[in-house]
Image (spheres, rainbow, N blue to C red):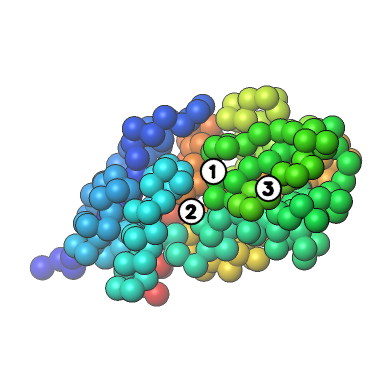
């Protein structure tokens, strides 16, 4: 008899109304391809904890911002860790998976990141700017984001909030990795249209920049997206290290690149299951 194929529970919110993106299309495409190598079932993130025992691994993909179901997500994490359930991406990620604390840690460590503080007494550490971005530490998808003038920051209760200078960047660019292997890059030439993306050919310096954050995150397996902006001086600054459920914008890359990504994703899952 042929060996049994690995069973994957693929977690996605197909109906999540993401701005400028269609989660359902991306996950329909990916799961159709993964079925060539795995026995696979899809479920909503609210159902993952109840269903995961019957599978070899849980693959968290376009599941939407967990802030909308934080209690249930925390329960899923707690149970998966207690029972040793394999979750891809692994649950020890240091990026968005753990909230926005990494922006503070990277700022303190001198990494090329948009300067970030979370205490009123540290506001003076931020460079002067026309406006400042204020957002929740646990936020995602621009939920709760607002822009304030410097004088409006006085007396701002920073508990649970991050403050950053608003950068007049030239464009945003995202680098996509499977495990520690670079796959492709996309950029948004118009800063006002974040999800209108085009293929981007990174320089060696660009890739060195992105790899610093992938290396810092120490995930042996998984998909990561390193989001950056091109500052007025030409340098790249980290905007976000997405290691929980990064949208991949696969509809914006050539078919050859998409096929190469699916192969890398499939191979990564096999290595993860064999580890």
| Figure quadrant of residue 266 | bottom left
Q: What residue is drawn where x is 37% and y is 71%?
A: 81
Q: Residues within 10 Å of mark 3 (few under 14, many from 20)?
A: few
Residue 212 in view, yes or no: no
Identify residue for label 2: 244
Identify residue for label 3: 157
| Figure quadrant of residue 106 | bottom right
Residue closest to the eye, 17 or 25: 17
In space, the residues marked 3 and 2 are separated at their CA atoms by: 28 Å
| Foreground tag (2 vs 1) | 1
| Foreground tag (3 vs 1) | 3
SS state under label 2: loop
Q: Residues within 10 Å of mark 2 (few under 14, many from 20)?
A: many
Q: Position of residue 208 (x, y in %)?
A: 74, 57
Identify residue for label 1: 140
- Above or below: residue 226 compared with residue 199: below
Q: Position of residue 53 (x, y in %)?
A: 22, 64
SS state under label 3: loop
Q: Earlier in the sequence, mark 3 or mark 1?
A: 1
- Give yes or no for contact between labels 3 and 2 (Cβ–Cβ under 8 Å): no
Q: Residues within 10 Å of mark 1 (few under 14, many from 20)?
A: some
């Amino acid at each position: 008899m042929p060996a049994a194929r690995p069973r994957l529970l693929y977690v996605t919110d197909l109906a999540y109304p993401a701005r400028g993106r269609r989660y359902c299309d991306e996950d329909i495409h990916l799961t159709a391809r993964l079925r060539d190598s795995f026995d696979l079932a899809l479920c909503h993130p609210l159902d993952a904890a109840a269903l995961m025992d019957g599978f070899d691994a849980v693959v968290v993909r376009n599941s939407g911002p967990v802030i909308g179901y934080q209690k249930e997500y925390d329960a899923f994490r707690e149970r998966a860790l207690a029972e040793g359930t394999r979750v891809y991406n692994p649950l020890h990620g240091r990026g968005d998976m753990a909230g926005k604390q990494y922006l503070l840690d990277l700022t303190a460590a001198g990494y090329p990141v948009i300067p970030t503080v979370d205490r009123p007494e540290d506001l003076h550490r931020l460079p002067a700017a026309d406006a400042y971005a204020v957002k929740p530490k646990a936020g995602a998808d621009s939920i709760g984001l607002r822009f304030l003038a410097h004088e409006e920051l006085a007396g701002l209760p920073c508990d649970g909030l991050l403050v950053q200078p608003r950068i007049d960047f030239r464009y945003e660019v995202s680098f996509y990795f499977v495990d520690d292997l670079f796959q492709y890059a996309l950029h948004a030439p118009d800063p006002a249209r974040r999800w209108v993306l085009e293929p981007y050919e990174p320089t060696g310096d660009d890739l060195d920049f992105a790899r610093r954050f992938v290396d810092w995150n120490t995930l042996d397996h998984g998909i990561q997206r390193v989001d950056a902006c091109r500052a007025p001086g030409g340098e790249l600054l980290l905007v976000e290290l997405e290691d929980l459920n990064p949208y991949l914008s696969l509809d914006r890359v050539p078919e050859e690149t998409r096929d190469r990504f699916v192969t890398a994703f499939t191979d990564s899952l096999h290595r993860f299951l064999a580890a």
